[in-house]
Amino acid sequence: MHPYSLLAAAKINLYLEILGDRPDGYHELIMVMQSVALTDQIDLHPNGTQLFRIHCDHPQVPTDQSNLAYRAAQLMATELPQAFAQFGGVDITIHKQIPVGAGLAGGSANAAAVLVGLDLLWNLGLTRSELQALGAHLGSDVPFCIAGGTLLATGRGEALAPLPDVHLWVVLGKYRSLSVSTAWAYQTYRQQFQSSYVWDLSSLETRRQRVHSGTMINAIAHGDNPQIAQLLHNDLERVVLPAHPSVLQLRKVFQEAGALGTMMSGSGPTVFALATSQTQAQQIQQQVQSVLPDPDLQLWVAPTTSTGIQLLASGT
Ligand code: ATP
C-alpha cells in the first residue's frame, strides 16, 4: 500500500448568524462558508500495525487521541472494521499552516482530509455524502471541509447547500499568542444575547434577518463582489471584539488599508479582508504591516478556492 498526501483548506465565514438554541445544545445557524487556499498537508502512511499515530510539530496541536485527525481515523476503523482489519493502522503526519484555535476550522479540515484519505487508501469508494455523514459525528464544520468551495450551511452548520463559487483574494490576520475557544464564544453569546434570539419563525425580526442572508446569497449568485463585501456579517463579533480590543483594532486597520470588506472569521480571533486581486491583497498586507509592526501579528494572502480536500500525491 502506498502513502497518500492531501491538502486541507481553511474556511472563513462570509456570513454567520445565530438564530437561537437547539434542543440538542447546539445553536441554530445560518452561515455562508468559504474555502481559502491556506492549507495543511496531511500525509497518511500505512504502518503495518493496528494503531493510528499522529505526528505534528505544532506546539498547540495534540498528538494523542484528542486530535481530530485521530478521531476521524478511529471513526473509520469503528464504522468499517473489515477494511481496518485488512489494511491496518496509519501514521498521520500533519504539516500545519492553518493557525490553531483561529476560527478557520483547521482541526475540522484535518479530520476531513483523514476521512477522504482513508477512503482512498482503503479503496472503499464511499460517496461524498457518506463521508460527510461520518464527518458530522466529529464536528459541525467537517462536512463543509470535505466539500469545500462556497456553501450555505444551516442547522448546526452541517446541513449544506451549494452556492456559486466566490472569486476573491483574502488577507488573513491573527495574533500568534491569541486563541479563542469556539465553545467560549458561543456560550458567552448565549449568556448575553439569548433574550434577543430570533428563532421564532413567525416573528418580523426573523423575516428581517432571513432577508439579510438572502441578500448575501443573491449577491453571490450574481458574482457581485462589492455587494458580498458590504454584506459580511458575524454575530460572534458581538462577544469576541469587546473581549479582545486588539482584534477590533486589527479589523479597523484592515478596513482603512482599502479592503473591499472585513470581518472576523467564525469564533475568531482571525480577521480577514477581501480584495479583488492578488496585488490589492498584497498592498493591504503591506499597509497593515506598516501600521501594526508587531512580530506577534501573522498575515497571510490567499485566494478563495472551490476545493476543500485536494489529493496531492499517491503511490510515491
Ligand atoms: P473552528 O473554526 O472549527 O472552531 P478553530 O480554527 O477555532 O476551529 P482549531 O484550529 O480547529 O480551532 O483547534 C481548536 C482546538 O482543537 C485546538 O486548541 C487544539 O488543541 C485542538 N485540536 C485537535 N485536533 C487538532 C488538529 N488536527 N489541528 C488543530 N487543532 C486541533
Image (spheres, rainbow, N blue to C red):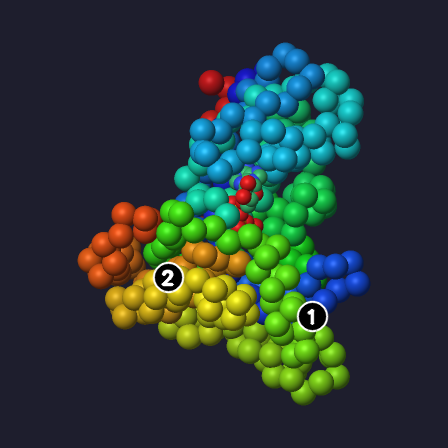
Question: x, y (%) of residue 26?
Answer: 71, 59
The local crowd at label 2, few if under 14, some if 14 to 19, many if 20 or more residues have their Cα within 10 Å, is some
Task: Give, as a three-letter code, the residue at label 2.
Answer: Ser
User: Total of numbered circles in the picture?
Assistant: 2
Question: x, y (%) of residue 216?
Answer: 51, 72
Marks 2/1: CA–CA distance: 28 Å
Residue at x-position 65% and y-position 79% = 196
Callout 1: helix, strand or loop? strand
Disc on the earlier residue, 2 or 1:
1
Q: Is mark 1 within 8 Å of ligand 1?
A: no
Task: Give, as a three-letter code, the residue at label 1.
Answer: Gly
Question: x, y (%) of residue 307?
Answer: 49, 46
Q: Quadrant of the N terminus?
A: top right
Front label number (2 vs 1)? 2
Q: In this view, which residue lies farthest toward the top?
A: 48
Q: Which mark is residue 246?
A: 2
**Residue at label 1?**
20
